[in-house]
Image (cartoon, rainbow, N blue to C red):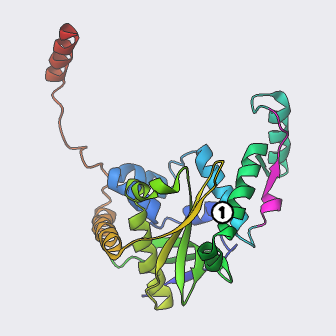
Amino acid sequence: MNCTIIPPGLETSEQYHASGSWGSTLISKFLSSPKLANLIRTGIWRPEPTVAMKFGSAFHVLMDPGGGFDGHYRVGPDVHHNTKIWKDAVATAAAEKVELLGADDHVDLQAMRASVFANPVAAHLLHSAEHEVGFRMPSGYGPFQVQCRADILHRRGRLADLKTCGDVDDFAGSVLTWGYHRQAALYRHIVHAACGEWLPFSFLVVESKAPLYRCRVVDLTDDYLATGWEEVEAALIEIGRRTVANDWRDHRDAESVDIPSWKRRAAQIAVAA
């Protein structure tokens, strides 16, 4: 199957996400709401990035040797973010197309980077790796495309993805909560089509807050990967069906709700209280 390899820097993050292709995050969104996933995919709805997402993006840029961190980010004045001094600094940075970082965030980012390189397994994964390599190809399950962007890639060795977290000991729960097992399975599927190799997949996980900033490399077991692919494949089949039918109704849109009964039940609860 023909797979396009997108070299680092060829597409901005905005261009990548506006391609109309289905990636792992969008597939996870589809599993909860086909309607919202399609609104995001088609650009009708663009969710505002959260503070955590912005911090994670900054960390990704910092860890990419070609990411140009110093050209994209600037440390702002060490004042409260509600002050006029901070707001003026933000406006100046925006005019210069630079994103402002708080002094505390900058300290955290640098400590996280140091922790990653202090972990010998993580440092080995980063050595001579390609960063932010994109892949896009026809899905094989209908008239649409799938895509992924590898944080860390050794084309004959391994795939790895950077994750920030509050506590590395809780990361196992995050895998299922955020569908990271699906991400790993989809990435391996796409990169196999591009490179001809079923690459092992690791998560390079680092804590984002003091005092420890612990870094751990996590490999998913085969059963996690198998379950991840089963869920991805089922979603792709359904996405294919909905693409052909142009039907993006949510799973429960056709259900009726007996409003009078609901009102009576609400009244009963109010009386009981």
Q: Is residue 178 left or right of residue 162?
A: left
- Amino acid type assigned to the residue bearing label 1 in the image: His
Q: Quadrant of the C terminus?
A: top left
Q: Position of residue 196 (x, y in %)?
A: 46, 91
Q: Nearer the viewer, residue 60 or 33?
A: 60
Element class at badge 1: helix
Return the residue at label 1: 60
Q: Label 1: few (<14), some or many (≥20) within 10 Å?
A: many
Residue 247 vertical placement versus 3 (above, below):
above
Q: Nearer the viewer, residue 46 or 50?
A: 50
* Residue at x 39% of width, y 73% of height: 185
Quadrant containing the N terminus is: bottom left
Residue 131, magenta (yes or no):
no
Q: Residue 35 in the image: state x and y as whole percent.
A: 36, 50
List x then y, in percent, for residue 77. 85, 39
Q: Is residue 70 magenta?
A: yes
Task: Please name whichever residue, 252 or 61, is drawn nearer the observer in this view of the structure.
Answer: 61
Furthest-top residue in this view:
271
Q: Which residues are magenta?
A: 68-79
Q: Residue at x 44, y 64 (%)?
A: 24
Q: Is residue 271 visible?
A: yes
User: Residue at left 39%, top 66%?
Assistant: 181
Q: Residue 270's x, y, as percent?
A: 22, 11
Question: Looking at the image, can residue 102 be seen?
Answer: no
Q: Image height check: is 165 above or below 102?
A: below
Number of marks in picture: 1
User: Would you identify the image quadrant in which residue 150 lies?
Assistant: bottom right
The correct choice, above or below, for 194 with respect to 237 in the image is below
